Image (spheres, coloured by chain):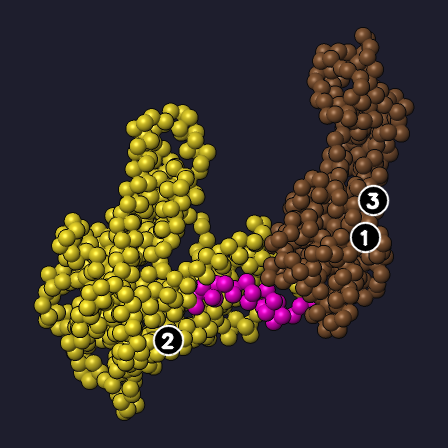
């Protein structure tokens, strides 16, 4: 290898690693540091002590824990039912259920809260029909919205766990005399337990850090996410905000740790495992069909309600169709939507390039540095968006350091969104890298191909679907995320998801619905394009 | 108890997997189902276990029809290639699983577990988890688990295929030893003819969903009835009747009941005798040294033959040799 090529490879590893340190490592250290900087000056545990004396925080903490626990319990049960129905039964309508579950991923979290208000709120369609004024704001509304929002991600994790079954274990148990129920308890449940555990932590984290639904439907039910926002945005208590941020890190960090452990334990499975065969059992299949359809239809109903309500003159009293809500009346109009698209495109392209270069560097230059990069890349998933956003404010809202000039730019928003989802992108990219044939790479090198040639002729063709998937994933997440950017936006740089929240706060619920519909249209059409594109790419492959 | 299979057949989506299977397994017999992949041997085993329904035919065990009996009530033992132990249970829990299901008292279960772990030489491993054991040890646990319930029939689905050559040879011996001691009728599926020869009382050689030939290992090796069986059971030289007469005039033509054009004479390589001779009609075209023996490739009367000789003698490529065989070492097979 020539010296110039070695430098190129080293740059492949060092550049993204340096960026990861600067835009993830430094902000996280900064927020930890700021939680120790007291309002009176000096370093100490003063902020943590002050927290004990703030009654609002205690109330919010208790509420968050209660909501998190109940949401987690309900979501896990529902997620297991749906995942089992999709993976292990012959129930009809599996594609519909899987599709319905993808819907919440296309929209900002608060869309579910909006839908709930349109359906069950004081001026909801159900209340009007029954002649009552139901109270959906508060714990119950938040519970339903959070469950439905977290459900898709939980189902994804549990499905993965259920997919790893071994048909032979069931055969062995069957021959030994175990009934189907016994087999379920002795094989299926133990197999899914780490998946369930991991899903539980993910749901808990999502719930206690979700900002959108808490604002839209939380009512007087104060939670930590809104509390941290009030402390920082309202009362300018930055130290206290940092402390709450550190608190929010705990469950997420724990969940990452558990997931690691689960992955290690799961490694014991046989490589030759055959997937369990599905047998038709009418009773069971019907039961799962009804349950899964109920869940899927609720999600569809909520999202659809938002779309429909955006075209209705005065929900639910004057039901004639109109486009007037699409005439956004608050400052900026549709500008935030285009900012969102621009920032998301930036986050997606920068993120995809960075991830590709990083993974290429890790693969071609194994060693300490590569290990460090891998370890650091696993961390961002454990940091709630709210905390990362706050950390960015502490780090980049500065005049003393050169990177302070990034503050208030679209680039910083894009970087924040990218690093928020760095881990997921990194995992996908590394998995994709495994499909690149090493022998082909070696053969090209032996034939005299340069690094650039290897990249073009070996990596790019094998990685194209992966690159596309990462690109679209980063774009979609960046379009709908709210919590990470809520602290970073400025009046001159508003984001779409934030505007939906502002519209709702201003009482313009129908306009919020219209704006949400636009976001969903952008994200949805892109997701559909990707779906069609990848389907044509692999003809003959079975639909999932 | 003996197993009796009559006129069993099975097809998948119109594709015939098993056709007219007739088979009897004696009270303490060890039967190997041998054949290439896709020959239906595993399908047959799964139907016997009750894990797969047959399309027709009868299976009885000790005179009792198994058709309506689900797998879990048959009381069999089964061992798979992939061990298939429950990963979250200890070795002892795995072995005791079948007993626990049948609500056996705990002290009986404990005693039985100890006895079986002792039998498979894993007495001190009861508290370990499967992931902490080697492949051979895991398969021993799987065997113990299958035997714990005193099965009326033991089914083995390529139990040794995933193991290293050395471990496989040891376990082969142990498995046969245990089966002999307990006297359980056993059916083992394998694609390894050497394994079948070494372990079975009787080999059932299968081809394309049918039984090509069943018999003792000696019978199948020395007197195969078809070209398929002859080839599957090891190397063989197959000679058309004309050349067969040249090699061994005493054999005459093809036997009665066999058309000359569909008859071949099967001679195992180690039965061919070679003699260095300047006037010999055979010519050595190559040799392969295998340590204890060597293989000699020959050209003889327009045919390529394979002979095996002791590695003590040396053969040169191009050397002329006399080839001979004694009549009892030959068998006629259907082409």
Chain in yellow? Answer: A
Magenta segment includes A195: yes
Chain in brown? Answer: B
Which mark is on residue B178? 1
Q: Quadrant of the N terminus of chain A?
A: top left
Residue B289 picture location, percent across and down = 72, 22
Front: mark 3 or 2: 2
Q: For the residues tagged 1 and 3, is the chain the same?
A: yes
Q: Quadrant of the C terminus of chain A?
A: bottom left
Residue B317 picture location, percent across and down = 71, 13
Which mark is on residue B74? none
Magenta-highlighted residues: A176-200
**Residue at (55% x, 59% y) in the render:** A165
- Asked whether the beta carbons under mark 1 and mark 2 sit within 8 Å of each other, the answer is no
Q: Kindly identify which residue carries mark 2.
A: A65
With B317 as the anchor, is A457 left or right in this view?
Answer: left
The crowd level at tag 1 (other Cα within 10 Å; few <14, some 14-19, many 20+) is some
Q: Mark 1 or 3 closer to N-term?
A: 1
Magenta segment includes B138: no
Q: Kindly identify which residue carries mark 3.
A: B215
* Number of residue marks: 3
Element on which disc 3 rests: strand
Residue B32 visible in the displayed image:
yes
Mark 1 belongs to which subunit? B
Residue B222 picture location, percent across and down = 83, 35
**Residue at (22% x, 64% y) in the render:** A42
Q: Nearer the viewer, residue B19 or B115?
A: B115
Magenta portion: prevailing SS class: helix
């Amino acid at each position: 290898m020539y010296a110039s090529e070695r430098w190129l490879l080293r740059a492949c590893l060092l550049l993204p690693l340096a960026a990861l340190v600067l835009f993830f490592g430094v902000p996280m250290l900064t927020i930890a540091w700021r939680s120790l900087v007291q309002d009176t000056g000096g370093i100490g545990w003063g902020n943590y002590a002050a927290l004990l004396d703030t009654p609002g925080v205690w109330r919010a903490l208790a509420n968050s824990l209660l909501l998190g626990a109940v949401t987690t319990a309900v979501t896990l049960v529902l997620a297991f039912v749906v995942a089992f129905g999709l993976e292990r039964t012959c129930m009809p309508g599996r594609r519909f259920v899987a599709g319905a579950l993808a819907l919440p991923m296309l929209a900002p979290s608060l869309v579910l809260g909006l839908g709930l208000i349109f359906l069950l709120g004081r001026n909801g369609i159900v209340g009007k029909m029954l002649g009552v004024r139901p109270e959906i704001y508060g714990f119950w509304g938040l519970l339903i919205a959070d469950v439905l929002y977290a459900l898709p991600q939980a189902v994804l994790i549990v499905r993965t766990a259920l997919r790893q079954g071994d048909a032979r274990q069931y055969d062995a148990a069957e021959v030994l005399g175990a009934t189907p129920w016994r087999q379920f308890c002795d094989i299926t449940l133990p197999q899914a337990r780490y998946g369930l555990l991991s899903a539980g932590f993910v749901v808990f984290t999502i719930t206690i850090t979700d900002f959108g639904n808490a604002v839209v439907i939380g009512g007087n039910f104060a939670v930590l996410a809104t509390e941290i926002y009030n402390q920082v945005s309202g009362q300018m208590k930055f130290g206290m905000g940092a402390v709450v941020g550190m608190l929010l890190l705990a469950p997420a960090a724990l969940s990452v740790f558990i997931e690691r452990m689960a992955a290690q334990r799961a490694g014991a499975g046989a490589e030759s495992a055959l997937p369990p065969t599905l047998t038709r059992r009418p009773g069971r299949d019907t039961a799962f069909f009804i349950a899964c359809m109920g869940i899927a239809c609720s999600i569809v109903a909520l999202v659809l309600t938002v779309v429909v309500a955006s075209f209705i003159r005065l929900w639910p009293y004057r039901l004639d169709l109109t486009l007037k809500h699409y005439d956004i009346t608050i400052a900026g109009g549709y500008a935030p939507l285009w900012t969102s698209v621009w920032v998301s495109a930036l986050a997606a392209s920068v993120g995809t390039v960075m991830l590709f270069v990083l993974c290429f560097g890790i693969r071609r230059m194994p060693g300490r540095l590569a290990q460090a990069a891998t370890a650091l890349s696993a961390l961002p998933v454990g940091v709630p968006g709210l905390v990362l956003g706050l950390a960015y404010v502490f780090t980049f809202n500065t005049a003393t350091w050169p990177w302070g000039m990034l503050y208030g730019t679209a680039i910083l928003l894009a970087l924040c969104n990218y690093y928020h989802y760095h881990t997921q992108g990194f995992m996908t990219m590394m998995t994709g890298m495994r499909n690149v044939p090493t022998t082909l790479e070696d053969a090209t090198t032996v034939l005299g191909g340069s690094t650039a040639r290897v990249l073009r002729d070996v990596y790019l063709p094998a990685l194209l679907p992966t690159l596309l998937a990462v690109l679209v994933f980063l774009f979609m997440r960046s379009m709908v995320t709210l919590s990470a950017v809520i602290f970073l936006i400025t009046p001159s740089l508003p984001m779409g998801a934030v505007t939906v929240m502002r519209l709702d706060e201003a009482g313009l619920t129908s306009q919020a619905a219209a704006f949400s519909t636009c976001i969903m249209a952008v994200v949805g059409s892109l997701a559909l394009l990707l779906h069609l594109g990848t389907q044509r790419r692999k003809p003959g492959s079975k639909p999932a | 108890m003996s197993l009796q299979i009559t006129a069993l057949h099975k097809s998948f989506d119109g594709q015939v997997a098993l056709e007219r299977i007739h088979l009897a397994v004696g009270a303490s017999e060890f039967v190997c189902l041998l054949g290439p992949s896709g020959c239906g041997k595993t399908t047959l085993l799964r139907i016997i276990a009750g894990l797969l329904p047959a399309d027709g035919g009868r299976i009885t065990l000790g005179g009792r029809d198994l058709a309506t009996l689900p797998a879990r009530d048959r009381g069999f033992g089964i061992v798979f290639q992939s061990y298939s132990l429950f990963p979250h249970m200890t070795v002892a829990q795995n072995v005791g699983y079948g007993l626990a299901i049948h609500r056996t008292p705990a002290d009986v279960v404990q005693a039985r577990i100890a006895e079986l772990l002792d039998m498979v030489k894993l007495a001190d491993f009861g508290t370990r988890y499967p992931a902490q054991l080697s492949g051979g040890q895991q398969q021993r646990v799987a065997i113990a688990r299958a035997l714990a319930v005193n099965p009326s029939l033991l089914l083995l689905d390529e139990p040794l295929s995933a193991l290293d050559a050395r471990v496989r040879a040891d376990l082969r011996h142990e498995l046969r030893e245990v089966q002999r001691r307990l006297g359980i009728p056993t059916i083992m599926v394998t694609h390894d003819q050497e394994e079948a020869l070494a372990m079975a009382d009787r080999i059932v050689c299968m081809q394309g969903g049918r039984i090509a030939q069943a018999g003792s290992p000696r019978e199948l090796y020395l007197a195969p009835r078809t070209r398929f069986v002859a080839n599957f059971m090891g190397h063989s030289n197959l000679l058309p009747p004309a050349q067969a007469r040249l090699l061994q005039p005493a054999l005459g033509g093809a036997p009665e009941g066999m058309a000359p054009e569909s008859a071949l004479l099967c001679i195992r390589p180690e039965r061919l005798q070679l003699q260095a001779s300047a006037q010999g009609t055979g010519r050595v075209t190559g040799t392969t040294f295998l340590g204890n023996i060597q293989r000699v490739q020959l050209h003889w009367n327009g045919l390529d033959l394979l002979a095996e000789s002791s590695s003590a003698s040396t053969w040169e490529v191009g050397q002329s040799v006399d080839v001979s065989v004694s009549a009892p070492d030959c068998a006629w097979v259907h082409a």
